[in-house]
Amino acid sequence: MATVTRVDKRTYSAINPTSIFTSCSFHDSVVLVSYLVLLFSSTITPSFGVSGVGEESGSYPEILRDEAVARLHQLGRVSDGDGYLERTFMSPAALRAGNLIREWMEDAGLRTWVDCLGNVHGRVEGRNASAEALLMGSHLDTVVDGGKFDGALGIVSVLSALKVLKVNGKLGELSRPVEVIAFSDEEGVRYQSTFLGSAAVAGILPVSALKISDKSDVTIEDALKKNSIEITEEHLLQLKYDPKSVWGYVEIHIEQGPVLEWVGFPLAVVEGIAGQTRIKVTMRGSQGHAGTVPMSMRHDPMAAAAEAIYSLESLCKSPQDFLSFDGHCKSFSMESLSASLVCTVGEISTWPSASNVIPGQVTFTVDLRTIDDMGREAVVYEFSNQVYKICDRRSVSCTIDRKHDAGAVICDSELSSKLKSAAYIGLKRMTGADIEDEIPVLMSGAGHDAMALSHLTKVGMLFVRCRGGISHSPEEHVLDDDVWASGLAILAFIETQL
């Protein structure tokens, strides 16, 4: 019998997040999550652990833990980078990763194919091929110098669960088709446009996207053709799934935050996903000699960019100091916006980028996220006004391009309830003990393929604990037993379709 180490109730009796999250409103939960992320951001030893676990009946550690972990490490070595992990849309490593995932899909008993946008599909029809299908999966691409669990865990865990059903002879007993999709691009690194793969499946990717170019002026269409994938407007339209043919979409993903580690739980149900906007700001001034142009006579886009970035930080730290809401807005808008708003300048470039030259042009990106869509629009509007004022005062020109917009998504309550029950069942199978505490319910500040799929069907998500809340980093890590827990939970969820 496994023994379970739990959080000492005395250590958080004043604030028990797992009970608060499940009882508070949607917006209140966002406030609490944001508060906890700020308050408990240090690495804490997980308090939900397993010791003395044997070959518990129905726990399948050899497939759901040992093989799954080995596959995650194997996939983590498939990279375009030398000494770091990088897989971007249609890169050589992305293609190798897709082939590897396709092998694992076939090992789980699935029929496989690759669509015209590079998404890798694996499907089992079950007893009723005409029934609405359950879609599951995540993305196979990574950020530059990323971690091996982001995206990959959501693919590997599902395939491991389906392999268990195959081994037990139950794969053909599913009441509806189950389709696993490894999406070709979620991160948007190469083309600065996220959710290319899932947006195509959901039918929200415009045909014009095929003409988007990367830094080498290679369009999405060209990248696909280079890899023997013909893509036309007709092909893209045909890629969209019929909403009537889909029952729902479920995604497993690492939390990418520290809350689960603090509350001492390996799994959480996701209540919703923050909306996001990505902006590219370009400022142009007068390029000149660093030693001969007086400070008072400069039109320096670098100085203008620095002021704009600082103003963005001030706006996002204290939006209530800059924004005002009229009577049409609900009273909680400012509170939820202040609690969930995060803004990041993650990329900046200059031309000609020389130490003795006043730049002629500076470009930087802005990533803005919050669960309040109305508040997000207000922040974008206010920031744009500030940028134009700064550029006007400093006599530099500026352009602001919105590169990506995604509204906040609320997960389906039915799917969330089923995932919560599945998490209980999975953890009980793993530990051999009843789970006394509530499964946490969290918001996601990170974007996921579920955001795009929400335009097609109802969505649900399950979060898995990651060490220190670290993600998009080689330090990203998930405990072997937490990989096991995610596999058991998704197995229990899929078993509801038997």
Image (spheres, rainbow, N blue to C red):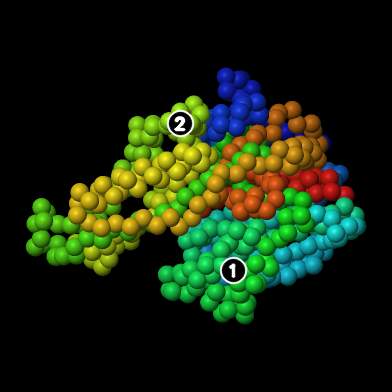
Q: Amino acid at mark 1?
A: Ala
Mark number, residue 94: 1
Q: Amino acid at mark 2?
A: Met
Counting other residues with Cα less than 10 Å from the Cα at mark 2, is it few (<14), some (14-19), or many (20 or more)?
some
Q: Which residue is mark 2?
A: 334
Task: Tell whether 262 sits left or right of 240.
Answer: left
Residue 352 in percent (x, y) is at 26, 67
Please say if 380 is above or below 336.
below
For residue 361, what is the image quadrant?
Answer: bottom left
Q: Which is more toward the observer, 82 or 214?
A: 214
- The numbered mark, 1 or 2, whose residue comes first in the sequence reads 1
For residue 101, what is the image quadrant?
Answer: bottom right
Image mark count:
2
Give me the C-alpha separation between circle 1 and circle 2.
42 Å
Query: Viewer-nearest of labels 1 and 2?
Result: 2
Residue 404 in percent (x, y) is at 49, 55
Res. 55 in view: no
